[in-house]
Amino acid sequence: MLRSGPAARERALVDWASLGADVVRIQVVWRDLADGRESLQDLDAAVAGAQRHGLDVLLNPTGPGPDRASTCRPQRGVCAPSPTRFDAWVATLGARYPTVHRWSVWNEPNNPNWLQPQRAPSGTPRSPQLYRALVRAASRALQRTGHGADLILAGETAPMPPRRSGPQARRPVAAGPFLRTLLAGRAPLGVTGIAHHPYPTGLNSPYGATGAAQFTLDGLPALIRLVHNAGRRHVLPAHAPVWLTELGIQTNPPDPFFGISPARQASWINQAEDRAQRDGAAALGQYLLVDEPALGGFQSGLRYADGRAKPSFSAYRLPLVLRRTANTLHLWGRVRPVRAEGATVELELRRAGAQKVRTLLTLQTRTGGDLSATLRPPRGQLRLSWTDATGRIEHGRWATVPAARVASAAFAPQP
């Protein structure tokens, strides 16, 4: 959006619009604007382009900041940034973008790559208090520049594995303790909701297994209870939403170390979306659209770095999840490009070992393209099929109907 030039930006915007995304999150790095690695003109074009394609913008002003904004050493830019200077910079963004109405403050403040010191020399967490001051500064800046009624999210936390060696300043604070400290007390935080990145902590499940310690998807109910409790104490507004603004599953290829198969990635992003929605998240962000070229980056895109679509591209556009309890099959799906208007969708069945496809059910989507059904489990594979506004028939990916002992379906590779 900011560094790859106008042509790449336009390709991404066309993709996002065709996929049926609602919001694009743009990370605005304080230091990069200050030292000229990014320009406000590029940010202007990114915001305008997203809005031209019908996408709302979530701006995420974040560090690292310029060295002059850091009040300690050795890690200038992320070491105790000045809330006063951050206030002034966010106010510049607020005044420049009156049509942006969604904001989130800083990125992964419980990660030492983004904020330090994480802990005092004694090991006591410091980053939640540092971050609280930054959040209140950003909130004041946005209030002053006409964004008092906007969505303003705090958090943007991520599951962080413990680090038992090295300086305490670089030992991250787990997302659970970080957010509990941030939301403690009774003083209003000045934001309207909480953002989090529920990345899985292993390669065995999209849900993670560390629950409330890290707020993976397994811990989402605990996170929502924490947020509602903060609402009762007026730290947050009542019924403050939880936005899951980043979730990415890496694939092998190209990453042989931290990736899963492309077909499994397609299944996992659908299962994660179904789980997040059922547990009460207000939004779920896919990270990324296109793989980063270097293996040290993220290979969690819906497209490979060379632009080829992964199976997850289709799975994201037409998600389908099958959950079985005894002799009942629970189906959740979505035709994401469908917004307010409804659409007629066919649920197609292909028997095991057969090539013939037949329509099992005709379903009607609700607002936002959602659909659900409960039926007796057939044997074989199911997929969604719908006709878009141009008359083109589009098929989703085949999902294998799970056996009674299996909790949810995996996507089968296309023949």
Image (cartoon, rainbow, N blue to C red):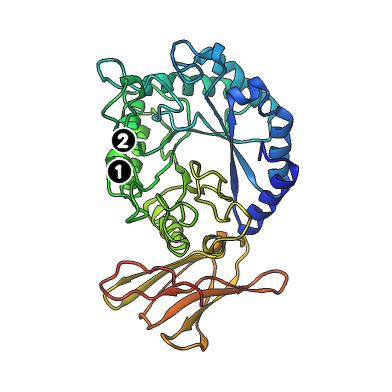
Number of numbered discs overlaid on the protein picture: 2
Q: Position of residue 255 (x, y in %)?
A: 46, 51
Q: Mark 1 sits on what residue?
A: 222
Quadrant where the image shows the N terminus: top right
Q: Quadrant of residue 163?
A: top left
Residue at 41 percent of width and 57 percent of height = 260
Name the residue beneath numbered marker 2: 176
Taking 364 as reference, is 54 left or right? Answer: right
Please determine whether, in this image, residue 288 is positioned above or below residue 354: above
Q: Residue visible at 32% across and 71% down? A: 324
- What secondary structure is found at the residue carrying circle 1? helix
Which disc, if any, is residue 278?
none
Q: Contact, CB < 8 Å: mark 2 with mark 1?
A: yes
- Is residue 370 among the parts visible in the rendering? no
Label 2 secondary element: helix
Amino acid type of the residue tagged 1 in the rendering: Ala
* Amino acid type at mark 2: Gly
The quadrant holding residue 401 is: bottom left
Relative to residue 395, is residue 109 drawn left or right? Answer: left
Q: Position of residue 336 (x, y in %)?
A: 57, 61
- Viewer-proximal residue, 14 or 22? 14
Q: Compared with residue 185, is residue 339 higher up or lower down, i.e. above or below? A: below
For label 2, the crowd category at 10 Å Cα-Cα, with few meaning under 14, some 14 to 19 and many 20 or more, is: many
